[in-house]
Amino acid sequence: MRVQRLLVPWIALAAACLTAGAQLPSDSRQPLRTLTTTREVHSLPPDQAARAYPVRLRVVVTYYDPYIDSRHGALFVCDRTGCIFVAISTRPILSLQAGTLVEITGVSGPGDYASDVLGTEVRVAGQSHLPTNPSKLTLTQLLTGAFDAQWVEIEGRVRSVHLKLHNVALEIATEDGTVDAVSLRQDGVDYQSLVDSLIRLRSNAGAVTNQHQLVGVRMFFSTLRQVSVIQPASRDPFAVPAVPIAELFRYSPDPGLLRRVHVQGEVTLDWPGRMLCIQDATNGICMQTAQADDVPLGSFVDVAGFPAINLFKPSLEDAVFRAASGLAAPPPIAITPDQAVKGNLDGKLVRIDAELVGRDFAAAEPTLMLRAGGVLLPAILPKDAALGAALPWKEGSIVRITGVCNVQVDSLSTNLGEGEVRPESMHILLRSIDDVSLVQAPSWWTPRQILEVLAAAGIVVLSAFTWIVVLRHRVKLQTRALRASEERLRHLSEHDALTGLPNRILLNDRLQTALKRAERFETCLGLLLVDVDGFKEVNDAFGHQAGDTLLCELAGRLNECVRATDTVARIGGDEFVVLLPDLRIPAEAANIAAEIVAAVSTPMAIDHAQTVITASIGVVTYPEGSTSQEALMQCADEAMYAAKEKGKNGFQVYRPKPVAFGGEGGSVLGPVPHSPLPLSGV
């Protein structure tokens, strides 16, 4: 067989690794054993993998891509023990296909996430076949990181296809989220025909990382032969019966994975490549679209897209459209200022007379500020509306505008209310400058009239002006000082002085709100009680100032492990609480707990010394654990102590205890499945 030798730059890198190994202490300079299976290499901790163990593998290629990463070529290989990623030189491009049997010589490396192989020689040894026993996984399981580089199988519906020069990416919607699947682009293959198909994909799982931390996952497959279509998409997305816009997101007892839908309507707004709004006889809708076709306003179009909810409003994602024939929608609705803020005109073409009070063309979207009655109505123009100083109307003019109503929802009132969307304000999206016409010019004075009025009132104005300015300045300073003082007091009352995290008062308020939301919308939330193991020993060894530094570092790590909508609070000396509202499934709370355990156990620099701490975490979810605020905190506390009793450096999920027939109810801490992230003691 022909031998492909990849000598540059990997030999230099391997030599550097071996040199570094030679500088280790005498007990570390023993000859390193040669690793011959993918599992042996992949199981190495990063610090051990960095010692450059010799690697010799006889494996089957499952994915080869010399283009996807500028640093190195991407090569996934598998043997009977598992799979692993091999970093090889981008040049020369090798004649490797999925199923090629190869012999690889190289050294181990720490990789971007898990240990991998730095390949220095790839020898083609024959032809084999792809693995036949993939692990059938969900996205939640993949996001644990335990299946990095492995051969897996997932199911989902293709939402969109993104073509690049050498690669193609499929966005696949699974039951618990979306994931991208990347492949080498093949000429003559109609990837777009997969959109809206329900597929089963066999591929390698690859980690998306941020400085060696898992932040996502991607799939890598070689050809469409690894894609099995379970439910094909319609050949023509516009051939399925169109549904009225008002019927989108109506109740259905078994919606499953939402398929692409077909709607029709008259174009009321077209910002090519950005946004398209249409209106039919029942309602209006706006959607984001990458299609840059310019369609005339008022024309009838077919639109196909995936139903989505955006800021409490129905919308379509990955929408495509085409011109169609049909009846025109009703003309613009003439509205009053009172009707403008009711919220039932969202997405519809409206017309209103208002006073021009300002303009802002320095913003990302050129905006006219209008006032109708006591209501402010921002009117947003397309980005290419280059008006600037050439705007033909003066402030104070009465203008008539025609555009698409875009209601802004008051999210807080809506979430805390009975479930009905509550409007906060309204924007009007203009199609072009032609949507603005002058109704009445503002009154104006001649320079002579202005001078006469100024001469008559000059003495009074000049005498009062200085005094008014002084008074206003004093009032402004005092008001600013009072507001700043109130804000400082409010912040101090709700936040921990050392770490800046919310304290118990603010946590209780947010937990009460989250419970109301979960009860109203029948969702779940998670509550994590985090207790630092061995914090007293750190204080005794390094002093209280070092302990304070450690708590601040720990607060930062906790915040990095959660979402922006979550709350990390400090409720005691070394006790923290993490509130996780709006969880899709209770298992997400355990996943985040595992991430926190791993993040906390990373060494910290304290007073020019490295120290390692661990954390014990109690996890409880609503409504599985309890339904009241006090009970949730108690359950989390019990779970945390159970985690400490099991050896610390881990987490424990609170499980309700079944009620035996004729016995008394209660609750216990049930067993937790294997942690999605590996937990290690200190």
Image (tube, helix red, strand yellow):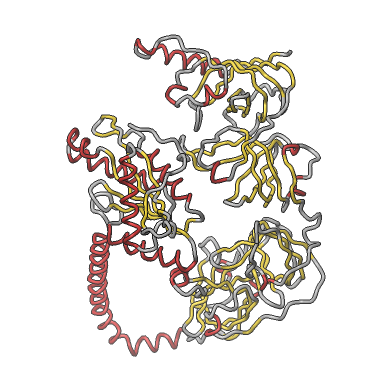
Look at the picture and state if 105 lies above or below 60. above
Q: Quadrant of residue 313?
A: bottom right
Locate the C terminus by quadrant: top left
The residue located at (27%, 44%) in the rendering is 551
Look at the picture and state if 558 lies above or below 12. below
The residue located at (74%, 61%) in the rendering is 321
Look at the picture and state if 262 lies above or below 464. above
Residue 364 drawn at (x, y percent):
53, 60
Left or right: residue 336 compared with residue 490: right
The residue located at (55%, 82%) in the rendering is 354
Residue 477 drawn at (x, y percent):
24, 69
Left or right: residue 157 compared with residue 457: right
Residue 76 drawn at (x, y percent):
62, 28
Left or right: residue 394 compared with residue 133: left
Q: How many marks?
A: 0
Residue 564 drawn at (x, y percent):
43, 54
Locate the N terminus by quadrant: top right
Out of 453 and 420, give the one closest to the viewer. 420
Out of 494 and 231, give the one closest to the viewer. 231
| Residue furthest to the front | 662
